[in-house]
Amino acid sequence: MNDYRILVVDDEEDLCEILKFNLENEGYMVDTANSAEEALKMDIGSYNLLLLDVMMGEISGFKMANILKKDKKTATVPIIFITAKDTENDTVTGFNLGADDYISKPFSLREVVARVKAVIRRTSTNEVEKQVEQISYQSLTLDITKKKVIIDNSEVTLTKKEFEILSLLLQNKGRVFSREDILARVWSDEVYVLDRTIDVNITRLRKKIDIYGKCIVTRLGYGYCFETE
């Protein structure tokens, strides 16, 4: 189970329950609300994602999103609009309001789950980067903001992918990432990437970071991690 909290806001109670059931099966903690009015009374800032229906009572999903984006406490909460409206103008309106995705009814539950995972993966990674400017281990320092790696006060030149792999591993010391995890986080925009590509990048990265290369450990059958002991 993970700690990601999702709020589903839709005036169709049955749909809320279906989404709640399926998302909880994926390990998410899910609450529901059957109107924007009900949802706005909740602690929305505590959620990692909103699934928000557009066509609701007096306060539409668009109007609710506008309210949330104007409040500093809720402005950064990701939103996926779910709606029966499927026109270009509605889609543009949703994205202009800061939506992270837009799903049209009818939809498959597999599609919803996949899109939820994609948005949470993208926004949670971005949030870590916003909060952490530098990560250090002994004389190795990774500057998130300037995209630089320093070892013993000397800069090490890495490619973009090598930097992102090191950043991922260093920010999560001791956690094992499978090749699939690394592909999803570092090569998320690529259509097709071979597992071998990851191995090649890891090999180059180990050489470039010198004595710290041994910290990037291979767990056979599982993946890679950055070990400090």
Image (cartoon, grey):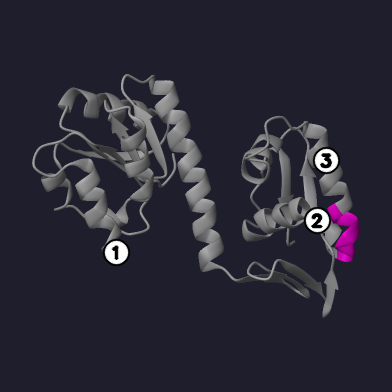
Instruction: Assess whether residue 16 is covered by the magenta stretch.
Output: no
Q: Earlier in the sequence, mark 2 or mark 1?
A: 1
**Badge 3 local density, few (<14 within 10 Å), some, or many (20+)?**
some
Res. 83 mark: none
Name the kind of residue labelled 2 in the image. Thr
**Marks 1 and 3, how far apart in space?**
41 Å
**The residue under label 3 is which amino acid type?**
Asp
Place of residue 151 in the rendered image (x, y in percent of width and height, measured from the top left): 82, 73
Residue 74 on image: x %, y %: 30, 59
Q: CA distance from mark 2 to mark 1?
A: 36 Å
* Farthest residue, direction bottom: 153
* Mark-to-mark CA distance, 2 and 3: 15 Å
| Residue shown at the point (39%, 19%) measured from the top left | 108
- Residue at image location 18% in from the left, 52% down from the top: 42
Percent position of residue 125, x then y:
54, 53
Q: Is residue 215 above or below residue 96?
A: below
Counting from the top left corner in percent of width and height, residue 124 is at: 49, 52
Q: Which is the main secondary structure of the residues drawn in magenta?
A: helix
Q: Residue at x 64, y 50 (%)?
A: 175
Q: Secondary structure at mark 2?
A: loop
The amino acid sitting under disc 1 is Lys
| Disc with the residue nearer the chain's start (2 vs 3) | 2
SS state under label 3: helix
> Is tag 1's residue or tag 3's residue first in the polypeptide sequence?
1
Q: Which mark is residue 159?
A: 2
Q: Residue under circle 1?
A: 73
Front-lying residue, 95 or 2: 95
Give, as a single range, the part of the protein colored magenta: 205-211
